[in-house]
């Protein structure tokens, strides 16, 4: 049977010994989710050619967006075309079901959630239908991701101006719904400024073509505007470039061209569903540069921003020091406690840089710099783009939430407003980190509301009401970018007054007399403190195996780290070194994204939609394709660690139950290989017999497409026990991981050779040591703890010496660095071992700083291991390669094999797709003579099996290039002590 789940003992886990029933993770009874109407679902299935899913998994994935809110839908429909949209609306109308259109699901106000039928427009309606370069327009479907549009029009020297920080995953339909803006709005305006025509379907079945001159407006809209010209002309605050709140009735004024398409923008799905849009394109500058200006504080930066606008910048972005938490990023910034990022454009790089220098001269800044190289600009912009996630944690790790994410004031009022905003935070005992589009007067801030506590929710309401009054006092808008949603719509009367808000309701009714399009948003809104996503989570911590030190030991807190910014939904090949999320890029399905899995875990804890608890098949199936690459641990702006959550889930899911064969075969690999080592030649011969190999793979749960790895004839441990070590005490210990020991002992031999050549005598740890990786990745956490405790006992003499542990396999190093102390949080030795782990390059840099590696002087390609990227970092490896003359970049992302993942039955196609993301194309493109590097056994195996390419560990490449080794000792010379003790367990 499988490993048992539940209570951790005093040395390994929770001190209170709580235990929960398998399948019931301590959930709190909720209000009960709506039950799908079988008739509605059948009718949708009959009418729509796209997918219709009313299952708990599909519904759970769309209960939330990037806001504080949660609404449970009845079903999810993925229309294939405009006819499908019309058919779905007709069925919903017949059954009285509300409808909400959903794009990337990154809305901050809750407007991408709904209680009826969710139309997922991202699955099929994602095409750029036409580009008219002469007219500078593009015709697009609503589900197209912004970056895909920008890629399509880039060959024409054009771009779409608005660019939210979510540009890699937000959709044009969502941008139209929220009237999204982005960093470049000072140059190119909001989405509404860049929409020419819209094709819209209403709940009542009308297909409207919206445009200037009142075109497409429902009957009665023109009369409504003519009857209230004075109220509309005077009711909207002037001088406010970022006024997104409410309905844009002023766009329908005759002097504004009565532009119905513009008025529809920002309506947040409450009027109709967009099926097609004609958007304006702008000329993309051929070159860009960045002036980075340092100021004494954020108010000084805010007051300086309007003065830079006459210089024609592309952006004027601001942030303060409490947002820049990465020391490396901080080191790149000029002196100051707040900064403006002012981007400039030009026909040539020299012209763009000259423009930036002109900004620098004109700015009254403490310090400044011009950054012209693309890599430097990307590094700085990444700090800004990740802010939506970074700001979700205060500098001391407390949770911070949206709700007042993007209010805006006239740019000239921004400095005083920020001072008043900070004072209001202090008066309520709250903290937040303002940043944003200072050139447009728009400020983002996430605040440490205690939304899981009734008193905290009451404070949230009081603060929201007072802040709304403060924004209005400064002539501002409650929303400057993300829309009102459920977060602010209740407060619109404070901004517009009752008369204009009443007009909003009448305007809504002319489009949607049934009130079925996204009810509870904008017109007749839900209370701002209703439908909070925290309400359904357990009130007491769930019994878990890992320690979750950054989340107070609480699994629920860890899961709700995901705030929905959806960086894991980035499409296409990953950029730079980023890894997250390889399975989503392979399948394109939300449930295979980090966000999707976090949402399912959230709903598992809630127990309303996903009712199986730890036994949930919906969660199990979504986690099945998680590679445990740990990419989200570093690349997710809020540090979601899905590899750990997966191991935790599997631990409970299979408690007391039979596990998949792979969990036993590959999960027990260290012990099985130790037993198999003496028979390695015989087993290798048997593996070459196809029927025997097929039988073995079937029994072990291995994918039939995979070749079985060849066992080494002699283990690394055996070699080390026969070899005599240099005289003197060791200065480091080389970890005999399972993969090096039994599959590639050449890596271990090479590492020992290089370290000794650098003057670092080494030894192997005594006894049976194992990092527990394979047990963790298969969720056998009780067994992992037992193995790790035994390892700590064996390492007692090593720890007493305080020497580093050189771990050659990145996945094993990451397990020792993170999984070990998180599984045994009460054992000080676990923290000591984690702190002693070094990679091969780190050990050389630390222990032999003056050693010069042999010069290789050739290009390199290959793979940076995903665990190395996520947990260990590869800066030392980069420096070592540079010193050895190995040029070029290794691929980021994940190789797709990922330990046991790519070997498990049913994972082969996804594993190959992950390798095709970046690794295989990079290797195919490598010039002859390129050195292929991969420190991870999985990465080397994937390259060998999919590309027929032999990659090597960096230690092997360096060892091969060393001068010839000295002659062996003379016969009869006294033997030196052996390098290692008894065989290890992995």
Image (tube, grey):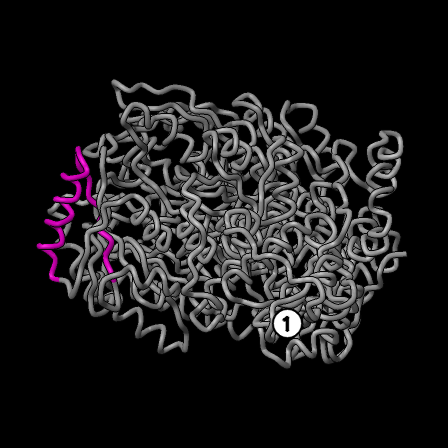
Q: Which x, y percent locates residue 76?
A: 63, 37
| Screen quadrant of the C terminus | bottom right
**Image position of 123 with respect to 156: above or below:** below
| Screen quadrant of the N terminus | bottom right
**Image position of 362 with respect to 204: above or below:** below
**Image position of 438 with respect to 903: above or below:** below
Looking at the picture, tell me which residue is in the foreground, 869 or 355: 869
Q: Which x, y percent locates residue 474?
A: 23, 62
The stretch in magenta equals: 339-364
Identity of the residue furthest to the right in this view: 1
**Image position of 39 with respect to 423: above or below:** above
Q: Is residue 363 magenta?
A: yes
Horizontal side, residue 865 vs residue 467: left or right:
right
Query: Can residue 835 be seen at all in this image of the molecule?
Result: no
Q: Is residue 361 magenta?
A: yes
Residue topped by disc 1:
553
Looking at the picture, tell me which residue is in the foreground, 51 or 789: 789
Looking at the picture, tell me which residue is in the foreground, 615 or 709: 709
Horizontal side, residue 69 vs residue 335: left or right:
right
Residue at screen point 44% across, 28% down: 200
The crowd level at tag 1 (other Cα within 10 Å; few <14, some 14-19, many 20+) is many
Q: Which x, y percent locates residue 24?
A: 78, 62
Query: Which picture quadrant has residue 650?
Result: bottom right
Q: Secondary structure at mark 1?
A: loop
Residue at screen point 25% across, 18% down: 134
């Amino acid at each position: 049977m499988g490993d048992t789940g539940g209570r951790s003992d005093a040395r390994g886990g929770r001190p209170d010994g709580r235990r929960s029933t398998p399948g019931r993770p301590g959930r709190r009874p909720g209000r009960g989710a709506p039950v799908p109407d079988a008739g509605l679902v059948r009718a949708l299935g009959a009418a729509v050619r796209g997918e219709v899913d009313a299952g708990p998994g599909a519904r759970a994935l769309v209960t939330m967006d990037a806001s504080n809110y949660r609404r449970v839908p009845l079903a999810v429909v993925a229309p294939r075309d405009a006819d499908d949209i019309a058919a779905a609306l007709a069925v919903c109308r017949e059954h009285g079901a509300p409808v909400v259109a959903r794009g990337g699901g990154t809305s901050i106000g809750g407007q991408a959630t709904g209680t009826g039928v969710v139309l997922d427009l991202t699955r099929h309606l994602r095409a750029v239908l036409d580009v008219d370069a002469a007219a500078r327009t593009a015709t697009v479907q609503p589900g197209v991701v912004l970056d895909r549009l920008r890629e399509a029009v880039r060959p024409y020297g054009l771009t779409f101006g608005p660019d939210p920080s979510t540009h890699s995953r937000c959709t044009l339909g969502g941008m139209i719904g929220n009237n999204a803006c982005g960093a470049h709005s000072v140059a190119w305006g909001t989405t509404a400024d860049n929409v020419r025509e819209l094709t819209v379907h209403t709940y009542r079945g009308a297909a409207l073509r919206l445009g200037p001159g009142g075109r497409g407006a429902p009957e009665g809209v023109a009369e409504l505007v003519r009857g209230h010209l004075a109220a509309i002309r005077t009711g909207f605050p002037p001088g406010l470039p970022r006024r997104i709140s409410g309905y844009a009735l002023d766009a329908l004024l005759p002097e504004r061209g009565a532009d119905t398409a513009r008025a529809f923008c920002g309506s947040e799905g409450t009027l109709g569903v967009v099926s097609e849009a004609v958007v304006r394109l702008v000329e993309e500058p051929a070159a860009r540069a960045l002036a980075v200006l340092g100021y004494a504080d954020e108010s000084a930066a805010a007051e300086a921003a309007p003065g830079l606008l006459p210089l024609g910048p592309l952006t004027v972005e601001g942030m303060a020091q409490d947002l820049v938490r990465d020391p490396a990023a901080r080191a790149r910034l000029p002196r100051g406690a707040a900064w403006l990022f002012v981007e400039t454009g030009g026909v040539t790089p020299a012209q763009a840089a000259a423009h930036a220098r002109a900004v620098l001269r004109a700015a009254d800044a403490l310090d400044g710099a011009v950054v012209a190289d693309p890599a430097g600009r990307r590094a700085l912009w990444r700090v800004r783009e990740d802010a939506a996630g970074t700001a979700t944690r205060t500098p001391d790790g407390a949770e911070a939430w949206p709700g007042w994410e993007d209010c805006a004031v006239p740019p000239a009022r921004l400095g005083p407003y920020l001072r008043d905003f900070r004072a209001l935070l202090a008066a309520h005992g709250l903290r937040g980190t303002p940043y944003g589009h200072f050139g447009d007067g728009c400020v983002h801030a996430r605040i440490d509301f205690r939304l899981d506590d009734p008193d905290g929710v009451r404070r949230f309401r009081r603060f929201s009401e007072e802040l709304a009054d403060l924004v209005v006092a400064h002539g501002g808008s409650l929303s400057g970018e993300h829309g009102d949603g459920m977060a602010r719509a209740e407060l619109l009367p404070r901004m517009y007054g009752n008369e204009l808000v009443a007009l909003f309701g009448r305007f809504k009714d002319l489009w949607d007399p049934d009130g079925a399009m996204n009810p509870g948003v904008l017109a007749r809104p839900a209370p701002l403190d209703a439908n909070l996503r925290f309400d359904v989570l357990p009130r007491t911590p769930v019994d878990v195996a890992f320690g979750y030190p950054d989340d107070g030991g609480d699994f629920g807190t860890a899961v709700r780290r995901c705030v929905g910014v959806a960086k894991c939904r980035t499409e296409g090949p990953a950029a730079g070194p980023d890894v997250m999320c390889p399975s989503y890029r392979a399948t394109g399905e939300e449930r295979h994204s980090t966000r999707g899995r976090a949402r399912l875990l959230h709903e598992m804890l809630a127990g309303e939609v996903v009712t199986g608890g730890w036994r949930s098949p919906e969660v199990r199936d979504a986690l099945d394709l998680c590679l445990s690459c740990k990419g989200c641990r570093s690349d997710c702006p809020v540090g979601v660690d899905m590899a750990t959550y997966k191991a935790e889930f599997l631990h409970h899911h299979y408690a007391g139950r039979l596990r998949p064969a792979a969990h036993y075969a590959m999960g027990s690999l260290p012990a099985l290989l130790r037993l198999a080592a003496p028979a390695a030649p015989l087993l290798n011969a048997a593996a070459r017999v196809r029927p025997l190999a097929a039988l073995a793979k079937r029994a072990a749960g291995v994918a039939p497409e995979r070749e079985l790895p060849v066992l080494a004839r002699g283990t690394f441990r055996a070699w080390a026990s026969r070899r005599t070590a240099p005289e003197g005490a060791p200065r480091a210990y080389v970890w005999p991981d399972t993969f090096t020991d039994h599959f590639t002992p050449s890596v271990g031999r090479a590492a020992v050779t290089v370290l000794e050549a650098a003057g670092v005598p080494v030894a192997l740890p005594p006894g049976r040591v194992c990092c527990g990786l394979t047990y963790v990745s298969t969720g056998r956490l009780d067994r992992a703890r037992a193995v790790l405790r035994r390892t700590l006992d064996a390492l007692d003499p090593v720890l007493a010496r305080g020497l580093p542990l050189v771990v050659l396999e990145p996945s094993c190093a990451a397990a020792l660095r993170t999984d070990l102390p998180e599984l045994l949080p009460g054992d000080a030795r676990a923290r000591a071992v984690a702190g002693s782990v070094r990679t091969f390059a780190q050990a050389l840099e630390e222990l032999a700083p003056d050693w010069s590696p042999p010069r290789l002087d050739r290009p390199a390609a290959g793979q940076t291991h995903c665990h190395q990227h996520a947990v260990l970092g590869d800066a030392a490896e980069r420096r070592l390669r540079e010193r050895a003359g190995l040029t070029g970049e290794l691929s980021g992302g994940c190789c797709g094999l990922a330990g046991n993942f790519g070997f498990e039955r049913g994972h082969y196609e996804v594993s190959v797709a992950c390798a095709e993301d970046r690794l295989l194309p990079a290797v195919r493109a490598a010039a002859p003579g390129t050195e292929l590097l991969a420190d991870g056994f999985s990465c080397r195996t994937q390259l060998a099996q999919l590309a027929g390419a032999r990659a090597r560990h960096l230690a092997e490449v360096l060892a091969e290039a060393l001068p010839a080794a000295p002659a062996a000792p003379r016969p009869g010379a006294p033997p030196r002590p052996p390098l290692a003790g008894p065989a290890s367990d992995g």
